[in-house]
Amino acid sequence: MFSGKVTTLSIEASSIRVLTLNGRRVERWGRTPLAAGLVKDGLIVQPKAVGQAVDALFKSLGEPKSRVIVSLSSVRSAPRLLTLPRAKRALLEEAMRRQAKKEMPLPLEEIYLSWQPIGEKDDEREFFVLGVPRPIVDAQVQTLVESGVKPYIMDLKPIALARAVDHRDALIIDLEPDAFGIILVTDGVPAIWRTITLRQEGMVLEDMVQQMTEEVAKIVEFHNRGHRESPLSPATPAFLTGELSGDVTVIERIQAGMEHPVEPLVVPLE
């Protein structure tokens, strides 16, 4: 948890959300709708217009634009767990880029690549590696410039949600009106995530839930095929987040379509 006062900013396809915290206490929050087409498939298509909307929301709340934590869309981003032989620091970047070139779904020149060591054994080290499409990051940065917001941290939404859930093994289902995200956390690491944009406007709830539960099953099956000795337990909880997560009907339908128990996300905030 951050000490002192911070403000969070999340730009979704249908709305902009701002929340101000002072330690663990929520001081203020606000939301403003976005016109259709300004954000599409995680990409801010019109940074100037969205930046103006962000600026107006901050002004209406009377919040400063410094020390802002910004959520970044994870559409087309790719996490990987890579194991590399121990190497000198000068050689690590070359070895990492060579391995990431084989593993990442997009060419390296089209992504921002970052990594962090998470474990080691004998002569090998394990890394959490992340590739984020450059257009998504660049458009977000341009939007912040237009709005006058000075980001303190910019973090991918699945990683932030994994921290908020704070479970060693968990499924996180992020439900928004235009898309849903599925994050699989194993051994404390968000190892797999997918963001599915709902192409059909006005999709009925039953169809959305069915599509979402089918995707969850595919992700779990994919994980278990690669971890036959330690498959994900059916008792692993699923946490719901996002704008639709408080809908009782949504919760009941998801629980009926999944073997994993659905649990409320308890956030340690006042």
Image (spheres, helix red, strand yellow):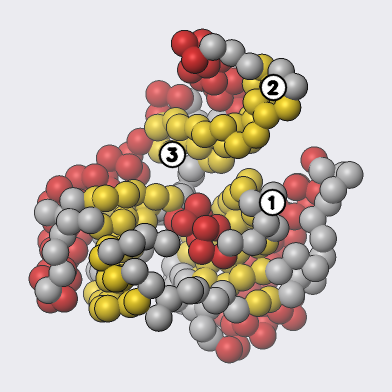
Q: Residue furthest bottom?
A: 248
User: What residue is shown with label 3?
Assistant: 132
**Residue where numbered disc 1 is placed:** 186
Cα distance in 3D space between marks 2 and 3: 25 Å
Q: Is residue 180 at least partly visible in the picture?
A: no
Q: Are marks 1 and 2 in contact (CB under 8 Å)?
A: no
Q: What residue sits 32% from the left and 49% below the top?
A: 153
Which residue is depicted at the point 67% across and 85% down?
252
10 Å crowding of disc 1: few (<14), some (14-19), many (20+): some
Of the image marks 1 and 2, the number of the one nearer the N terminus = 2
Helix, strand or loop under label 3: strand
Labels 1, 2: front one: 2
Q: Is residue 123 left or right of residue 53?
A: right
Q: Quadrant of residue 19?
A: bottom left
Residue 188 lies, with reference to residue 129, above or below; the image says below
Camera-side residue of 250 and 67: 67
Which image quadrant: the N terminus? bottom left
Residue 84 screen position, x and y as percent: 65, 21
Q: Residue at x 75, y 22 (%)?
A: 122
Residue receiving disc 2 = 124
Q: Secondary structure at mark 2?
A: strand
Q: Position of residue 82 (x, y in %)?
A: 64, 29
Q: Position of residue 226 (x, y in %)?
A: 80, 40
Q: Secondary structure at mark 1?
A: strand
Give the class, few, some or many, for how many residues have Cα within 10 Å of label 3's Cα (few <14, many ≥20). many
